[in-house]
Image (tube, helix red, strand yellow):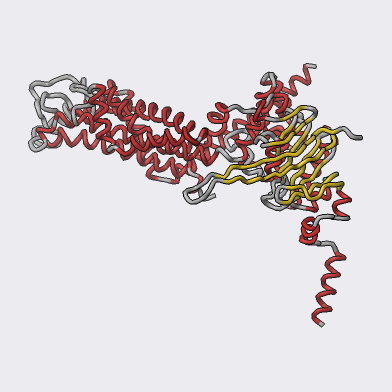
Amino acid sequence: MSDIILKVRDLYRTYDIKGGLFKKPGKFTAVKGVSFDVERGSTLAIVGESGCGKSTLARMLTMIDAQSEGGIEIDGLPIDIAKTGISKDMRQKVQIIFQNPYGSLNPRQKIGHVLEEPLLLNTDMGAAERRELALEMLQKVGLQPEHYGRYPHMFSGGQRQRIAIARAIMLKPKLLVLDEPVSALDLSVQAQILNLLKDLQDEMGLTYIFISHDLSVVKYLADKVMVMYFGEVVEYGTRDEVFDAPQHAYTKTLFAATPRADADSIKKRLAAKAASAA
Amino acid sequence: MTKTSSVDTAKTTAVEKESRNATKAMLVEFWYYFSQNKGAVLGLALFVLLVSVAIFAPLVAPHHPDMQFRDALLSPPFWEAGGSLTYPLGTDAVGRDILSRLIFGARFSLFIGVVVVTIALVGGIVIGLVAGYVGGAVDTFIMRIMDIILSFPSLLLALVLVAILGPGLMNAMIAIAIVLQPHFVRLTRAAVMAEVNRDYVVAARVAGAGHFRLMFKTILPNCLAPLIVQATLSFSNAILDAAALGFLGMGAQPPTPEWGTMLAEAREFILSAWWVVTFPGVAILVTVLAINLVGDGLRDALDPKLKRS
């Protein structure tokens, strides 16, 4: 199966740094020549430390920022918003879910309107039809129809993230970019949201770009893993390849830095401690 | 078929009811925080009283504001020797009843407040939104102009503007609105700049919202809290400035029963007939105080930083 939905080639993003009184203007390259393909219906996890260019990459894929150089192709549609702008077609291909569910919902907008906004802006549906779809979607992500008229501050973090997910899939996008969607949530809620994401992927045939620094989450959800380090891809392969045999030094450090909480490793650690004490 | 549709309507009404409840909950919460501030409630009561007096002025006032009673010139208030209950707060130099003039003057003061705040608010919001949203050179240009306006003493600038436009109540109001506008621009700009990079704005952009929708529907409602507070405080400022312009002869022209103009007319009787100047002054004081108290209460209720939850 090689049905490629997202094709990224030699992607660059540079930021101009303004010169100050005693500082020369410079350039900062956040993403340096990234290339990858994503198959339809699969999940690509992008892993890396803070400031490695993950979020910049996400912003380019979701057409929030334009790329400086290189090509993005989503479902056969070339994306270059600096030159061509964004069409309604492009909007309906890709959506994003943010890390912080407390910041990603407009505090003055009722949930129903949050969900209907993408439809209102991109389709010619009537009000009744939009409402019907919004109510349906609420149930799909595990919320109640009576939540339709409430404000975001009346919900918990997990519920808000469900709302954000609902908003993102209202337009039935092909590609969903998840920018650390569970790192602001409690562990128990994390599991619920991850399960919801998995169910939705099966049901709607979604493709996920999953950005995270939490390796256990990545292991649970990803088909392929890409590791970024200072704007470059240092490791790219299937989940098992990367987890079992990391090639790059940074990936090895990353895995070593992950705390392990399974019984065997704890026993081993205690034994080592006892041995050194004796 | 009919059964499913009735189920549907039942669901729809349930959803609508819940939606109304949510709106009501917001209002209840607002009132809770507002009513914690006793001064604000007192101010609101005074303000409501003032508004109703202004609306029902012809019914409340004992006399016509411009009627001259030639047999009772400079008659003192009723509790002083020589005063009578016909003219409860006395009469002025040409025999007009001061209480009636004050009651009708409330109309002018409120009208001034509403018009000035509306002009300043609308202009300030639009300019501030553009400055904060667009940023860059546009922002710098707009803000430097606002700085220039702010660097003039406000009453002096209003005086100059009235001198250019010609004296009169309407021109005075326009002048005061222009003077008050920069405060709204600054406030809006600061609030917009804080909101514009928040995730929900980016999310609306990804959903396909255009610039106008982002500015007015997504960002603006979240910037309103400080603006409402500023608007109430400007309301009282406008009344004060209009009174000052009236006192200097540049605002409302006699015989308009505007409080500041009344003060100006009574200037020469300050020593001989204290009531002619005192009551308009007290009216201005009480009104401005009431509105400022309401403004403080609104700040408590709307500013999330001051909330205790």
> With respect to residue B208, does A243 lie above or below?
below
- Residue extending furthest bottom? A278
Q: Position of residue A208 (x, y in %)?
A: 79, 39
Frontmost residue, A29 versus B181: A29
Q: Quadrant location of the N terminus of chain B? A: top right
Q: Would you say A48 lies left or right of B278 here?
A: right
Frontmost residue, A159 versus A117: A117
Q: Position of residue B172 (x, y in %)?
A: 27, 26
**Tally of numbered tags:** 0
Q: Would you say B37 lies left or right of A76 here?
A: left
Residue depicted at 84% across the width and 55% down the height: A247
Residue depicted at 46% across the width and 35% down the height: B139
> With respect to residue A176, does B161 lie above or below?
above
> With respect to residue A166, does A251 lie above or below?
below
- Residue extending furthest front? A24
Can residue A138 be seen at all in this image of the molecule? no
Q: Position of residue B242 (x, y in %)?
A: 27, 30
Can residue A274 be seen at all in this image of the molecule? yes
Q: Would you say B60 lies left or right of B275 here?
A: right
> With respect to residue B105, does B292 lie above or below?
below
Q: Position of residue B219 (x, y in %)?
A: 54, 34
Frontmost residue, B106 versus B260: B260
Frontmost residue, A210 versus B226: A210
Q: Would you identify the image quadrant in which residue B105 lies?
A: top left
Q: Would you say A167 lies left or right of B170 here?
A: right
Q: Would you identify the image quadrant in which residue A253 lies?
A: bottom right
